[in-house]
Image (cartoon, rainbow, N blue to C red):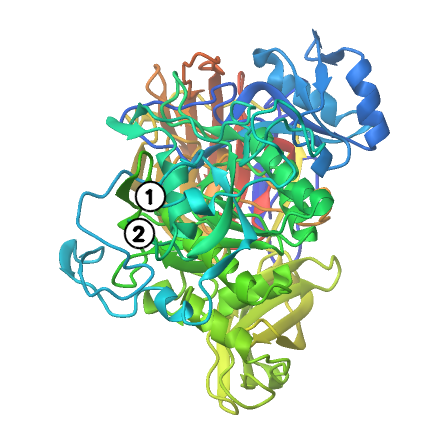
Amino acid sequence: MSSSSVRPQRAARIVRSRVLVFSLTFLLIASSALFPASLAAPQDSDSLASLNNRTNKVKSSRAEFVPGEILVRFRTEETAASKERAIAPLRANNQEIALDVQQFEGSEIIEGLRVAHVAPEQTLDAIEALNKRADVLYAEPNYIRRKDSVPNDPSFGSLWGLRNTGQVGFNDLTGTSEPGKPDADIDADEAWDITTGSRSVVVGVIDEGIDINHVDLQANIWRNPGETPGNGRDDDGNGFVDDVNGWDFYHNDASVYDGPGTFTEDGQQIEKDSHGTHVAGTIGAVGNNGVGVVGVNHQVSIMSLKILGAGATDTRAPSSVRTTVAAYNYAEKMKRDFGINIRAVNNSYGGGGKSQTELLAIKALGDVGILFVASAGNDTENNDAIAHYPSNYDAPNLLAVAATDRFDNLASFSDFGANTVTVGAPGRSILSTTPNNTYSLFSGTSMASPHVTGAAALLCAAYPNLSVKQLRDVLLLSGDIIPSLAGKVYSYRRMNVNNALRALAENDATAPAAAGNLQVASQNGRSVTLQWAAPGDDGNSGQAALNEVSFRDAITGTSLLLGTSLPVAPGSTQSITFTLPYRHTSGTLILRVFDNVGTASTASVNVTLDAAAADPYTQTTSAATGLSTGGTALGLNGDDRYRQNYALPFAFPFFGQQRTSVTVSTNGALYFSNPPTQTPPSSAPEEIADDAGSSISELATHEMIAGLWDDLRTDRGGDIYIVQPDANRVIFRWQAVTFDTATTTGSRGENPVNFEIELRRDGTIIFRYGSGNTKLFSVVGISAGAPDAYVVNSHSF
């Protein structure tokens, strides 16, 4: 085994050696035996387990994937086509891997994209081998996606999200039913004085299927003008036979509705395709027909792109990136090649695992003018810290939507994120269409997202020539400012469609003036106060909508969002204090001021930092050393267990603070802040093929030491042991196994995990790794809970 170490950095740097050193210096000792050569590529915390069915335990943020399927992008389309005919068997981990490369329904949206089939147990080894090939841009797992709804809400409700009803609602903050708050809705009824929508505008619902015969939806279901129903031919030549109302990518057929019938979900009997039908009703249940409810649009054309379905062995009906991308490809192709006026797609689903394929396909939708609206997730998590995809992708055509309740509170279940969730919308106790001409109350960010998608369609009915940027910006910046969303949502706003229509009617082409006298008013190490004279909405007149501050590194050009704030009155002095990210010694602070339709001004000021303050740790790697022996067992046996406030034998310096206690996690980490409530994200930094330098690390926002951060368990004869060799050192040693989920599709097995973290009084941190440690999808490094955490790429997968 080998080791690595990290030390806190003093003003005089420690000379780098073969030991991996983060020096205040933070010493990280990394092991070459930690990961065998066969595991040098990304791996999943569930590995071959595509499901997690543990009772009373939701591990929604883990990066689950489909065993035996790999999304691979070859360097050229010609190369990809040739590999369909023949590809030499792969070699990895002293084994031969048979590979079957095929086109799939989503291949066209990204040049060179294919799906490769391998034996399920060889998925991870094949990914590693493919990523080493010169003719491959990337290979990645086919990650799982699930719908973002919560169970039916039995309380009474009506269309409060569209208009003020004043009826009783559930207050998330007090846990009681009370009269609803006026103006917690999106003011759709006022917007209908301007437009009620148009069937010339097409919206894609990427979800479960839709009951196309529902009395309140039938007139608003999209009908392919190039297809003759039921003749068994591909009349329009798009590659899909009888795709009259869209396509079922889950079953790969033309039927977009699998009902009638029910399946069991969380102990309840749920009507098939009820989730997709409910989403469709919020977007466009028919108005003024004397029946049921009304959507944001009275008339619109709803295209069903089914990716989710109730399976016999999986009542939660997951999809995968392969399936989502197939649906994206259909929408992009129908707009680009067949002139179908698709303006937005709704995406009320998500999961873990950042997919290059999924991101590139979403951007391709934007290239043809399609807005991508995504639900933020229902785990009450900070998405800045634990990513939820597709809503977490950084794409210029994407809006990520949190859920609000009748009282304009952030809904108790909703995910949030000041930098990653863009806007809020009603999502609790939403009444909408369900199969067989019924209506139901559902809650979730799945219900919030279609309010925004429906609003996008309504705007396009009134303003057909809106660009996707204009559409996104006005929905984001014209909403109502909601106190409960401050620091939780990028825009501080709950979407308001009436405000958006009226903002567009102003035909405002005048940008805010550049912020006056922008300067660094004070600086204490990485803490910087930026100050300026506030501009207005039009030049220096009127109220601007939003301030955004970002940092651009002078050397690498890397850009990091630092935060947003609400503007003050024009001419007033405004300031914001923030902490500059680690590992950047000089750069530019950029202040952008937006008006309510997205027109922005830019001002900037340079900033420098002392090297020791900016980059306090160095790292080196050494040869193998042995693990400690003996010690005192914590008795921390189980899965996802913590020992909080464990007293350290000395004050330990960590990112400039003296720490006297630590929270110990069975999942291979030590925390100096509150640990996450979900399973470890198991996601290391990833480079995106068309966005060099862009990466994420889910170490960010946690003050922690990740020795081997993964989904581990210590109740298989293991434990966490404390060894104190002397007064200046303490060692935490994990004897654990990887978490195993037995399913019909296989599992990764309970593989042994043996490693330790040593803390030294001088701030040195040493990681050592023993035998086993295979089939992992781990993160290794340290973080002060800020962007640009110290991630050890050689040990993170």
Query: Image point 23% across, 64% down: which residue?
Result: 165
Graded by Cα atoms within 10 Å as few (under 14), some (14 to 19) or many (20 or more), the crowding at tag 2 reads many
User: Residue 696 shows which numbered tag?
Assistant: none
Q: Residues within 10 Å of mark 1 (few under 14, many from 20)?
A: many
Provide the residue designation for mark 2: 293
What type is the residue that disc 2 sits on? Answer: Val
In the rendered structure, which amino acid carries the disc numbered 1? Answer: Thr
Of residues 625 and 110, which is closer to you in this image? 110
The answer to whether residue 525 is left or right of residue 291 is right
Residue at far top of view: 95
Asked whether disc 1 touches disc 2, contact meaning CB atoms under 8 Å apart, the reply is yes
The one nearer the camera, 622 or 604, is: 604
Among the 4 quarters of the image, the one containing residue 331: top right
The local secondary structure at tag 2 comes to loop
**114 lies left or right of 151:** right
Residue in the picture at 76% in, 25% down: 132
On-image quarter of the C terminus: top right
Residue 325 location (% of width, % of height): 61, 35
Q: Residue 628 appears at what percent x and percent y?
A: 47, 24
Q: Residue at x 35, y 35 (%)?
A: 274
Q: Is residue 611 above or below residue 132?
A: below
Q: Is residue 337 above or below residue 708?
A: below
> Residue 490 at x, y = what percent?
48, 62
Question: Relative to 20, does residue 392 appear above or below in the rendering?
Answer: below
Q: Can residue 419 be seen here?
A: no
Question: Could you tell whether 100 is left or right of 285 in the image?
Answer: right
Q: Nearer the viewer, residue 1 or 226?
A: 226
Q: Is residue 459 left or right of residue 310?
A: right
According to the picture, the residue beneath numbered tag 1 turns out to be 433
Point out the tag, 1 or 2, that comes first from the N-terminus: 2
Distance, label 1 to label 2, CA atoms, is 7 Å
